Image (spheres, rainbow, N blue to C red):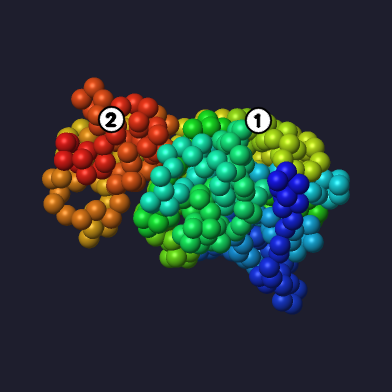
Amino acid sequence: MRRLLVAALVAATAPACGTGSASGDAVPVVVGYQSKTINTATAGTLLRERGFFEQRLDELGRRTGKRYEVTWQDYDTGAPITAQMIAGKVDIGSMGDFPLLINGSRTQARGDDGTRMVSVTGYNARGALNMVVVRPDSTARTLADLAGQRVSASVGSAGHGTLVRALGDIDVTVENQQPSVGASALQGGGVAALSQFVAWPGQLVFDKRAKLLYDGAALGIPTLHGVVVRKPFATAQPDVLAEFLRAQLDATRYLHENPLAAARSVADATGLPPEVVYLYNGPNGIATFDLSLKSALRAALRDDVPFLESIGDIERLDVDRFIDDGPLRDSGFQGTEDLVNPARITGTDSACGIEVGDPATAGEVWFEGEEATRPAATPDCLLKQVKQAGKGVRAAYVPDAATGTRWFAEHAHWVREGGKLLPFTTEAAAAARGAVLTYDQALAGA
């Protein structure tokens, strides 16, 4: 199995998504992104839909007298973006932490002509961007229940890394599959579980095609996505890279200031349910959006390298050399070491009549027929709002009582403790705290 993992880890398919050539005398810029990996939205889907990069390049063109032409190439995972970057066909790409490191490792043989990581898109300080799901009728309650069975993952992805780390000595057969293929295999019974990155777990659970078995936040290891650039492009076109990073900041600000509109924009472009996008990208969402190359995230990447070496034949990577904060500084961005999500749920709770503030307890309800969500100060207050409203709920969001992972209230597992109702993302986590209640039971007892 180790040999198979090694072979799969270094393989990368690269479907054609455009030539990347510019017309006339335009300067070509090719951006590789993953539209459905929605915590890269500020450097991908949302950035493209809002046109921030093109607007920035138009302004640059008025200063330089040049014309810039952007080609966007959409992929399912980071591996083909890396393959296209090696071939010189993608200039700027966004991908998860493991693919980023593999990208740097595979290009380091080129010396200064390799690639550099220049910003972060979205991250979760505990690792909740990656999760393991099983079919709704599965009897599995913990990862140990998967022993001896087949589990789908995109080998070399962040979702695969979470799976292998979480499994420890539990022996499973990993099927190397693209996310969509793995989701189909899960539905068809070809695999017992699926380990993937945002937004696949949330989408499958929301559609009631899966239930959450393992929350990556249980590892307590930061996971992130970021932006990587070909060094020759960065050297030849520093102004273009600076405008890309400024445009990424534009998209990040827009997402923070207009979270529901941003979620709808991404949903319209990808076909994902807006309720799922908002789970990850909304206030107090699973993803925290901040361009900063924080020390904690750098340390997590350094710690990932020995692990990647242990499961695949990649060369050791000098992470501190691979991460280059020069372009971000040159763009005028002032970074921060703060890991607190700047997108917070605020307002007044209509059921409890108190101000909403603490992200450890704050939630939201999106009622049918309403154009805005309602804030809830605590999970109990959220349940009361649902009972009092007397209308359908599109989605209700609550934070896991132990990890803080934002999750769907309907799909959470509930425990009454000290007179309070506490939600958990997984049944195993809830059972460790007390008698497990369903959402309907919690709602009735609110």
Quadrant containing the C terminus in the rendered view = top left
Residue designated by label 2: 435
Give the class, few, some or many, for how many residues have Cα within 10 Å of label 2's Cα (few <14, many ≥20): few
In percent of the image, x 24 and y 53: which residue is there?
Answer: 393
Q: Amino acid at mark 1?
A: Ala
Using residue 377 as the reference point, say whether residue 338 is left or right of it.
right
Q: 363 or 177: nearer the eye? A: 177
Where does residue 331 sit, x and y in percent of width and height? 64, 46
Q: Residue furthest bottom?
A: 24
Residue designated by label 1: 299
Using residue 317 as the reference point, say whether residue 175 is left or right of it.
left
Gap in angstroms between the C-alphas marked 2 and 1 = 38 Å
Q: Residue furthest front?
A: 148
Q: 27 or 190: nearer the eye? A: 190
Number of numbered callouts drawn: 2
Figure check: 320 above or below 4: above
Quarter occupied by residue 33: bottom right
Where does residue 301 sit, x and y in percent of width and height? 66, 36
Mark toward the viewer: 2 or 1: 2
Where does residue 11 sit, x and y in percent of width and height? 74, 56
Where does residue 58 sit, x and y in percent of width and height? 61, 64
Per the rendering, the mark at residue 415 is none
Q: Amino acid at mark 2?
A: Ala
In percent of the image, x 36 and y 55: which residue is there?
Answer: 208
Give the class, few, some or many, for how many residues have Cα within 10 Å of label 1's Cα (few <14, many ≥20): few
Using residue 76 as the reference point, say whether residue 432 is left or right of it.
left
Q: Element type at marker 1?
A: helix
In percent of the image, x 81 and y 54: which residue is there?
Answer: 232
Residue 69 in view, yes or no: no
